[in-house]
Image (tube, rainbow, N blue to C red):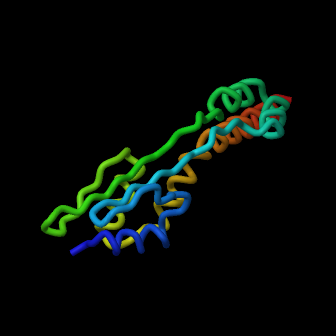
Amino acid sequence: MQTLKGFKNFMSVNGANWVLINQSDSMLSYQRNNPGQKGSCLIALILLILGIVPGLLYLYFSHRSPSTNQLTITEDDDGNLSASGDAAGLKLYNYFLAGKYDAGEKIKDAAEKNSVIIICVVIAVLALFFFMMTR
């Protein structure tokens, strides 16, 4: 059976950027702040030099607004845990229930965040290739 103490230990190892904001005998509440992010000017400039379309796509899609994730774990009188919060928090809780935290998921999450850069670079390389072929 999973316990609050077990979940707290799990978060101390796997809960990067999650901060314990409230704790009682039957409840743990975590929060994670994700700062806003804008695209790199250097990457945008390189992509604009290689092709106007990849550069404009990068400038448009690379902006991320700030957000906050919440996760609250409560333990009932029978010792059963229940979770509430947003998708990111519940995903982490499901890893805890499965007894593991998959490093592959961290790589997948990072790839999703950088997918705009990857797509723009591929478009720029293809555009450069076709430009060189037509000369």
What residue do we see at 73% from left, 36% from top?
A: 124
Q: What is the residue that sits farthest to the left in this orientation? A: 78
Q: Judge whether 6 appears above or below 21 on screen.
A: below
Q: Judge whether 124 appears above or below 5 on screen.
A: above
In the depicted view, which residue is nearer to us: 24 or 113? 24
Q: How far across and down, in percent of the image, does residue 27 sit?
A: 31, 60
Q: What is the residue that sits farthest to the front in this orientation? A: 24
Q: Judge whether 76 appears above or below 121 on screen.
A: below
In the depicted view, which residue is nearer to us: 69 or 110? 69
What residue do we see at 54% from left, 62% from top?
A: 16
107 lies left or right of 90: right
75 lies left or right of 123: left
In the depicted view, which residue is nearer to us: 125 or 21? 21
Q: How many marks?
A: 0
Q: How far across and down, in percent of the image, does residue 68 sit?
A: 50, 43
Which quadrant is the N terminus positioned in? bottom left
Residue 102 falls in image quadrant? bottom left
What residue do we see at 42% from left, 48% from top?
A: 70
Q: How far across and down, in percent of the image, does residue 85 sit?
A: 35, 47
Which quadrant is the C terminus positioned in? top right
Residue 116 falls in image quadrant? top right
Q: How far across and down, in percent of the image, does residue 119 sit?
A: 63, 39
34 lies left or right of 124: left
In the depicted view, which residue is nearer to us: 68 or 109? 68
